[in-house]
Image: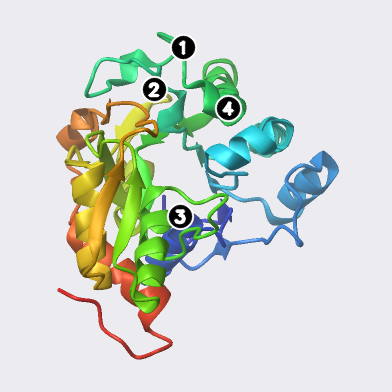
Amino acid sequence: MKKTEKILITGSTGMVGSALVRLLKNQGFTSLFTPTHQELDLCDQIQVFAYFSQHRPECIFHLAAVVGGIHANNTYPAKFIYDNTQMHCNVMQAAYQYGVKKLLFPGSACTYPKHAPQPIQESSFLDGRIEPTNIAYAAAKINGIVMGQSYAREHQLHVIIPMPTNAYGVGDNFNPEASHVIPALMKRFHEAKLAQLSKVVLWGTGTPLREFIYVDDFADALVFLMHHYHSPDIINVGTMQEITIANLAREIAQVVGFAGEITLDISKPDGAPRKCLDSSKLFNLGWKPRISLKDGLIEMYQQEFLLSTGGQATR
């Protein structure tokens, strides 16, 4: 991937897309195409083909997706599966038809079986039943992964399929109906601090183990893979650093400055007991994450909650 090549980034206004645009600009890439949804509806095949015909992108980071938490997945499954499938179908066909050199399409850890051996290796893909609450989103991602690999095999399209762990960071979604665990907890602790509440209640036992990657590290891994990975085989992107939900809550509370009690409602479900990706394949290529969970949480909180008020996170 050369710095003068035409690079299309779909989903460029999202958390990962924004971080990727920042990184590529800082590295001196000079021909970035970052259309908004208003400028290019990826569900419209005519629009997509016209855009490719006009701009002729050479490399693509296809990051656009309809995403959300359990509530959104359960409420809008038809939208999740239709929009996401339609987008990658249009983008991949256009990439093939207009001679794109490289296309990166990220999968999702939720496409791995619910009870896959831990840490999860790439070979676990399609080796068991997935979590039912994610079925529509995961099905669309699985289709995109298989489609990308099929275009690579039949049409020699250079496709790269990273499989990321949970990403978080600046630009995350704090909507309580759609947010994931870190932005949801950060918002709750921040509001509890402002309201001077004495305690915050967490669902479950707090014992499940989770893995998180800061969005700037994730963007860096995507660029690394575009330069150094040359296979359509899935490759995991994570940190292999795990933390319990209870300890994660304590870390976030400390960063936010919430001094109250954290209690557990053990009558509520925990979810999967452990979810960690085996990223040794990526690490062996020479890439490693650089941003610790604590530093990532501090940066996220300062950018999202404190800049407008001039405050400082607790270190």
The quarter of the displayed image where residue 250 is located: bottom left
Mark 1–mark 4 Cα distance, whole angstroms, equals 18 Å
Is label 1 or label 4 in front? Answer: 1
Task: Give whichever of discs 2 and 4 has the lower sequence position.
Answer: 4
Image quadrant in which you'd find residue 91: top right
Give amino acid for label 1.
Arg
Q: Are marks 1 and 4 in contact (CB under 8 Å)?
A: no
SS for dot 1: loop
The Cα atoms of the two marked residues, 1 and 3, are separated by 28 Å
* Mark earlier in primary sequence (3, 4): 3
Tell me what residue is drawn at x 27 percent, y 38 percent.
210
Q: Residue furthest top?
A: 127
Q: Nearer the viewer, mark 2 or mark 4?
A: 4
Earlier residue among tags 1 and 4? 1
Q: Where residue 293 sits: x, y (%)?
A: 21, 55
| Residue tagged 4 | 144
Disc 3 secondary structure class: helix
Question: Which label was assigned to residue 16?
Answer: 3
Q: How many angstroms separate mark 1 from mark 2 (CA)? A: 20 Å
| Disc 3 + disc 4, Cβ < 8 Å | no
For the residues labelled 2 and 4, the Cα–Cα distance comes to 13 Å
Q: Position of residue 12 (x, y in %)?
A: 56, 59
Report, in whole angstroms, how far the alpha carbon at label 3 lies from the one at label 4.
18 Å
The answer to which of 48 and 210 lies nearer the viewer is 210
Say left or right for 262 vs 23: left
**Crowding near pointer 2: few (<14 within 10 Å), some, many (20+)?**
some
Q: Which residue is mark 1?
A: 129
Of callouts 1 and 3, the N-terminal one: 3
Left or right of residue 302, residue 207 in this image: left
Residue named by callout 2 = 233
Residue at 41% in and 49% down:
1
> How far separated are the C-alphas under marks 3 and 2?
22 Å
